[in-house]
Each structure stands twice: as structure tokens, then as C-alpha cells.
Image: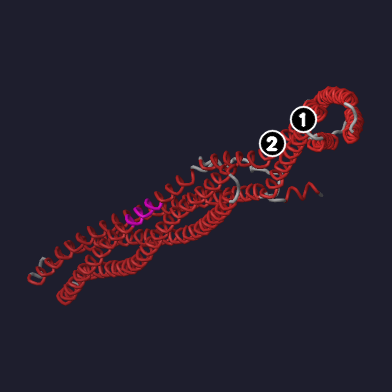
Amino acid sequence: MKLRIRQFQSIRHKLTVAFVTVIILIVGLGGALSATFYSYLNEYSSLLQSTDQANQLSGVLKPALDDDIRDIVNGYKAFEEGRQYELLEEMNRRISTLEKAEPSNDVLSKIEEIRNTMASLEGQLAVLKQQITDGASVDEQSETLALTIDITSLIEQNIQALVREKLIHTAAKANSIQQSFKDNLYLFIAAASLILLLSFYIAWFIARAIAQPIARLQKSFAQLADGNLSISPVESATRDEIGMLCESYNSMLSSLKRVIISVRETSLHVSASSEHIYEGVSENDKAGEQISVSTQSITEAISEQEILVQHSAVQFGLLTDSFQPLLAKAKAINGHAEQSVRLARQGETDMTAFLDSFEQLKHSVSQVGDDTCLLDERIGDMAALLKKIRGLAAETNILSLNAAIEAGRESQSRKSFSVIAERVKHLAGETGALASAADQHMAAVREHLHSIRAQMRISTERIVAGESKAESANCILQSIRSANTEVQDQILAVNKDMQSAADRISHVQELVESVQLQSSNIRIQVGDIAAMGEEQAASLQQVSAISDMLMEHVRELDRSISKFH
């Protein structure tokens, strides 16, 4: 449970706890070391001060007191004018000061000996005072003076012994302080080593929990920038900011893989549809060529028929002027009529083929329209996928901004984290730019598809109109065949019955003129059909050009996503 809690703690909390722990340990170790050194310093200073005070006792009492007592005994000054009691009081004060700060029993015993000797000195001073007051002899006073001098000498010897004992005690104490200092120094070195090991562990933890995932993220981002989609996800054992960044990167990588795969599939569908459109346009081109050839054949046949009809009209005019050669001319007209019937049958056959070609063209155009609608739907799917790409780029940009803000709040050691966040932001910007460019290409492709559909609708309408005119031309050809058959029957009737030839010749002349008029109309209509065929061919060429442009856009889209593999 505690491990899971530490996993979900933030990097700031972990680093704060680690650094505060190290700082507290360092400060505590430094404080303990300073306190120990300060106590040693105070103790050593106290030893030096007490030793100096003991040294200062030597020569303080004896010279001044001996001279003062000698002057009193010799009568140079009165007892009351002497400084003997001040010297004793000063000596007692210094001894008391030294005694208060002295921890050694041996030194204290020496001080006690000095006090006892000074008490004897004070007794001799009292005796001397009493002798002077009583007016004792000079010998008695001299004897007291000699005894006093002996006592001050003894005090001086005791002071020297005190100084020696103090020096011995100071040397022993100094050795003890030095040994304690060494022991504590070793202890502090061991504690500093433990703190250093703890710092190394914290550094290792930071490297494992922060630096290593960031390095793996940087390597993955570099491979992703090179277009490698086969990289593995970046795993992190923690659930802090680094762990959340790794999870966001893994989610982005998975979504990007799905989007790129979907775009590839859509690109393949678009390419297949474009190829299908191109095949349909090629078939329409072939059908248009067949229509043009058939129309040209019909035009030639009708022109030839018109020439024959004109020739027949001339012949019927001659028959009107000369009835006698009517029979011979009737035979020639019969032969021409038979040829006209053959031509009419051939025209009907060509017109039937023409109508079949129109039906195939109409089917191809309808199929091209269906493929165009399917392509439009695929492009719509691609636009939705690109919208997802832009959303992912925006989410990555927001995550990089949050990471950059968090990195800005950390210490100087977090600069590498800020660099990775900036790299996440830069990669998100490039993904958004690529999505925008692909979106622009899709818009251009969609615009071209709308243009193709408009042209296909116009072509379909024209094909329907051409079909209507072709059916009308077929009816006219059937009328021509019927008229030629009727002319042939009438010529045969002229051969059988020459008596009614004059009336029938007039009627045949009228029919021939009617046929001539109908032939002119057919020629005009066939010319219109030929013009429509040429216009259809131009429209189909335009469709072919648009299809080539669509294929180029598809190739460009495929090149845009081919860098991801």
C-alpha cells in the first residue's frame, strides 16, 4: 500500500521530500559537528585559562609581602600602613576563582594546602601585630619576620606544586580532548558517508524515475519524427507526471497508428476508385470514337443517297419531257431504288450500332457517377480522420504546455524535462500542419470531384438528347426505306402498265422531292449528331484530365503519409 501511494505521488513531492531529507541530515550533522567542536574549544580554552591563572599565582604574594613585613619590622612604616592584608585578600580571591573552575581533585587538594599555609601566615601576621602593639623586642619581631618569610616560601612552593599538578592535569585533559575529537571525527565521517550514500540513492532514484523515462521518450519522439510507427510504447512504473506523460504518449502513438492505417486504407480505396473512373472514361472514349465513325459512315451514305435522289429527280424530269424512253429510265431508276434500299438498310444497321454504342456510353457514364459518389464518401471519411488528427495534435500541444509549466516550477535540474515538453509541442505543431495540408488536398480533390459530377451530368443529358435524335434518325431511315420500296413498286407498276405512267411519274416526282427534303433533314440531324459526338469526346477528355488530376492528388496524399511506416 505504501509503495502504491509513493507511485501516485507527484515528482515535486518526491523531490521535495528527498532534498529536504538530505538537507536536514546535512544540517543536523553540521550542527552536531559544530556543537561538538565548540564544546571542545570551550573546554580547551578553560584549561588554558585556568593554567594561566595558576601560573599568575606564582610570585604574587611572597616578594611584596616579604618587603612589606620587613619594612614594618625595621620601623620604616607602621603595621597599619602595610599592604599585607590586601595582598592576602588578593591571593585568596585568585585562589577562589581558580577553585571554582577546577574539576581535578588533585589540584583542589593542592589549593587546600595553600589555604592552610595562608591561614598559618595570617596567624603569624596577627602575632607580629600583637608584638608591635605590646612593644616586643627587635629579636622577637625578627624571629617572627623570619618565620613569616619561611611561611611565604612554603606558600610559594605550594603554588609551584599547584602549577605542576595543573600542568599535568591540563596535559591529560588535552590528550582526552584530542582522543574524543578523533572518535567524534570518525563518527562524523561515517555519518557523512551514510548521507553521501543516501544522496547517491536519491540521484539513482531520480535517474530511474525521471531521467530514464525522459530519455526513452526523447528516443521514441525522434523515431516518430523520422516516420517510424513500429516503435514500442514507453512504460513507466510510477503514476506521477512522468508516468502520465508516458501514458499520454502511448495513447497518442496508438491513435496515430490507427489514423495512419485508416488513411492508408482510404487512400487505397481512392486510388482504386480513380483507376475505375479512368477505365470508365477510356471506355467512353472508345464508344465516342465508334459513334463518330458510325456518324461519318451515315453522313457519307446519306450524301450518296442525296446524289442518287437528285439524279433520280433529273431522270423523272426527262421522263416528263419524253415519255418514250420512260421504260429504259424506269429500269435505271429501279436499279437506283434497289441501291437506295440497300443503302437505307445499311444506314439502319449503322444506326442500330450507333444506338447500342450510345447505350453503352450511358451505362459507363452512370457507373462513373456512382464511383464518383463513392469517392466523395471516402474523402468525407478521410476528412473525419484528419479532424481526429487535428484533435490529437491539439491535445498533445495542451499536454506539452502543461509539462512545460510544470517544468518551469522545478529546479534547474528539470531543464531537460522542459526541452522534451518543447519537443512534444513542436511535434504536435508538425502533426497539425500535416493535417491542415492533407485537409487542403482533400478540399481540392472534393472540388474536382464536384466538377467531375457536374460534367458527368451534362454528358448524361447530352447523351439522352443524342439518343433521342438517333432514334429520330432511325425513324427517318425507316421512312426512306419505305419510300424507296414504294418507288421500286411504282417503277414496276410503270413497267406493267405504261398507260398510267404519266400520272404515276408526277406522283413519283413528288415522292422523290419529298425524299430529297428528308435526306437533307437527315444530313442536318446527322451533322448535329456528329457535333454532339465531338462535344462528348471533348467532355470525356476533360473528365479524363480531371481524373488524372485526381490521381495526382491521391499520389501526393500517399507521399504525405508514406513517411510513416
Name which residue lies at 74% across and 31% down: 193
Above or below, comparing residue 98 to residue 519 in the picture: above
Contact? badges 2 and 1 (CB < 8 Å):
no
Classify 10 Å Cα crowding around label 2: few (below 14), some (14-19), many (20 and above). few
Q: Which three-letter amino acid code belongs to the residue tagged 2?
A: Trp
- What x and y, as percent, mark residue 171? 81, 23
> Closer to the camera, 519 or 309?
519
> Closer to the camera, 266 or 508?
266
Task: Please count the marks in the image.
Answer: 2
Q: Which residues are magenta?
A: 540-550
Q: Classify the position of the C terminus by image quarter.
A: top right
Above or below, comparing residue 271 to residue 323 in the picture: above
> Closer to the camera, 442 or 255?
255
Classify 10 Å Cα crowding around label 1: few (below 14), some (14-19), many (20 and above). few
- What x and y, as percent, mark residue 24? 73, 43
Quarter-of-image position of residue 65 = top right
Task: Provide the residue designation for mark 2.
Answer: 204
Q: Residue 76, labelled with which disc?
A: 1
Image-based side of 45 in relation to 267, left or right: right
Name which residue lies at 70% across and 42% down: 23
Q: Which three-letter amino acid code belongs to the residue tagged 1?
A: Tyr
Identify the mark nearer the N-term, 2 or 1: 1
Q: Is 26 colored magenta in this rendering?
A: no
> Closer to the camera, 246 or 96?
96
